[in-house]
Image (tube, rainbow, N blue to C red):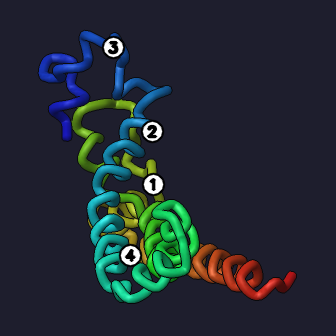
Amino acid sequence: MGFLYLPSLSPIQDVLDIDFLGATTVTYSMANVAVWGGTGFNMLVLYTTLRAIPRDLYEAARLDGASEPQIAVRVKIPMLTPAIILTTVLSIIATIQVFTEPTALRPLTNTISSTWSPLMKVYRDAFVTGDLYSAAATSIVIAAISLVLSFGFLRLVRDRAFGEG
């Protein structure tokens, strides 16, 4: 990961002339790493769901005169909706619990503090300063935020699906 962002090692650093670890760009660098890290999992879930769609549905749609774009919009996407919802909820939770990306990039720059993300604060409190009570309290807050946002998203999706609210 540091290979792409360190000026002395990066193959694109000199071409683009951007400090990927600077104060204004380090958040985008972490987001880039997180997106590439999560894309594989999300694509695996979506691909598996696509493969599970019965071929009979495609054949029936073709017999009814549906074109390939119509099959994609009227068969594939509705069948993918539960998997899209699942990957969205898991991505929301992963975003709230970001830890790996800033922790991995932190040794490469001085723009990421030891409490940049809530889980980094939990780690620092629990294992560096030994303040287990603060670490536990912060963990409870992170869990509550994850719960509220996840259920909020699920409720929004349910309300839109059933035409409520």
Where is residue 106 shown, x and y percent of the image? 29, 41
The numbered mark at residue 77 is: none
Report the number of discs: 4
The numbered mark at residue 117 is: 1
Q: If you read the primary sequence from the N terminus, does the residue marked by circle 3 or circle 2 appear first?
A: 3
Where is residue 72 shown, x and y percent of the image? 49, 67
Q: Are marks 4 and 1 in contact (CB under 8 Å)?
A: no
Check disc 1 and give the amino acid type. Ser
Measured Cα–Cα span from mark 1 to mark 2: 11 Å
Q: If you read the primary sequence from the N terminus, does the residue marked by circle 1 or circle 2 appear first?
A: 2
Tell me if 86 is positioned left or right of 6 in this view. Answer: right
Instruction: Find numbered disc 3 in the image and state the secondary structure of the residue it sits on.
Output: helix
Check disc 4 and give the amino acid type. Leu
Q: If you read the primary sequence from the N terminus, does the residue marked by circle 1 or circle 3 appear first?
A: 3
Q: If you read the primary sequence from the N terminus, does the residue marked by circle 4 or circle 3 appear first?
A: 3
Residue holding disc 2: 27
Splitting the image into 4 quarters, where does residue 83 fall?
A: bottom left
Measured Cα–Cα span from mark 1 to mark 3: 28 Å
Tag in front: 1 or 3 = 3
